[in-house]
Image (cartoon, helix red, strand yellow):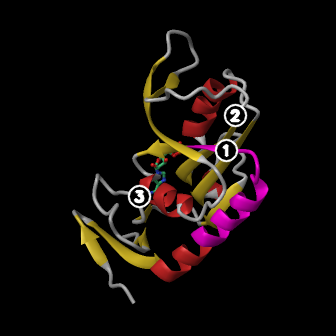
Amino acid sequence: MAATIKIHDKVFTPFISKETIEQRVAALGKQIDEDYAGKNPLFIAILNGSFIFAADLFRHITIDAEISFIKLASYKGTSSTGNVVTAIGMEEQLHHRHIIILEDIVDTGKTLYSFLPEIELRQPASLKIATFLSKPSALKHPVHADYIGFEVPNKFVLGYGLDYDGHGRNLPELYELVED
Ligand code: IMP
């Protein structure tokens, strides 16, 4: 069993084991593999957080499929809409493609809620979201994830691609913050 770890001022305790994560990601991959047979889906992984999940999930896909990685940048909109999120690195043609967005976690849903219209504008054949984690009790925007690895309580988590101040992404298991 992994031990408690400390990053800066915060203490994290093991939450979901490496083996449990591996099994769940394999099951998700198998499900997507079956659902998208013959559709040549295009996975779009949102950096940085989803890179480990994306790499592991994608290795369970056996059908013909493509993957691309994008980064999101937010800037202040000129109107009262507030922050606008735009994608950096999106070069693929999305028109008529079956798109699966890969995320590390849907927390408040703000990121995806702001970004999904940019995808929808390009008129894909279908658009679904696969997220490693979902925090349903933190959700503030109407974002529906179609494939969810684990639903977690509204606590800060770390590892398997998710960071605290840039650290901890390389941890193979998931940790949760110990509140002081
Ligand atoms: P949103 O609130 O759904 O827009 O989440 C935005 C981003 O915040 C996620 O893609 C993560 O990168 C990050 N995030 C949210 N919750 C956590 C957490 O518990 N640990 C680490 N990163 C998080």
Q: In this view of the protein, which residue sits in the foreground, 157 or 149?
A: 149
In the image, residue 25 above or below residue 128: below
42 to the left or right of 128: left
Label number found at residue 41: 1
- Residue at image x 47%, y 52%? 50
- Residue at image x 63%, y 32%? 116
Is the CB of the residue bearing disc 3 within 8 angstroms of ligand 1?
yes
Q: Which numbered disc flags the more N-terminal residue, 1 or 2?
A: 1
- Residue at image x 44%, y 27%? 74
Count neighbours of disc 3 (C-alpha within 10 A) and say few if under 14, some if 14 to 19, many if 20 or more: many
Magenta highlight range = 25-43
Residue type beneath disc 3: Leu
Q: Could you tell me if the residues under marks 1 and 2 are in contact, i.e. CB atoms within 8 Å?
A: yes
Q: Which numbered disc flags the more N-terminal residue, 3 or 2?
A: 2
Quadrant of the rendering where the C terminus is positioned: bottom left
Label number found at residue 84: none
Q: Is residue 29 magenta?
A: yes
Of labels 3 and 1, the one closer to you = 1
Residue type beneath disc 2: Arg
Count neighbours of disc 1 (C-alpha within 10 A) and say few if under 14, some if 14 to 19, many if 20 or more: many
Q: Could you tell me if the residues under marks 3 and 1 are in contact, i.e. CB atoms within 8 Å?
A: no
- Residue at image x 68%, y 44%? 40
Disc 3 and disc 2: Cα gap in Å? 28 Å
Image coordinates for residue 140, horizontal then vertical, percent: 64, 43
The residue indicated by pointer 3 is 162
Of labels 3 and 2, the one closer to you = 2
The residue indicated by pointer 2 is 97
Count neighbours of disc 2 (C-alpha within 10 A) and say few if under 14, some if 14 to 19, many if 20 or more: some
Image coordinates for residue 44, horizontal then vertical, percent: 55, 41
Q: In this view of the protein, which residue sits in the foreground, 17 or 67?
A: 67
Is the CB of the residue bearing disc 2 within 8 angstroms of ligand 1?
no
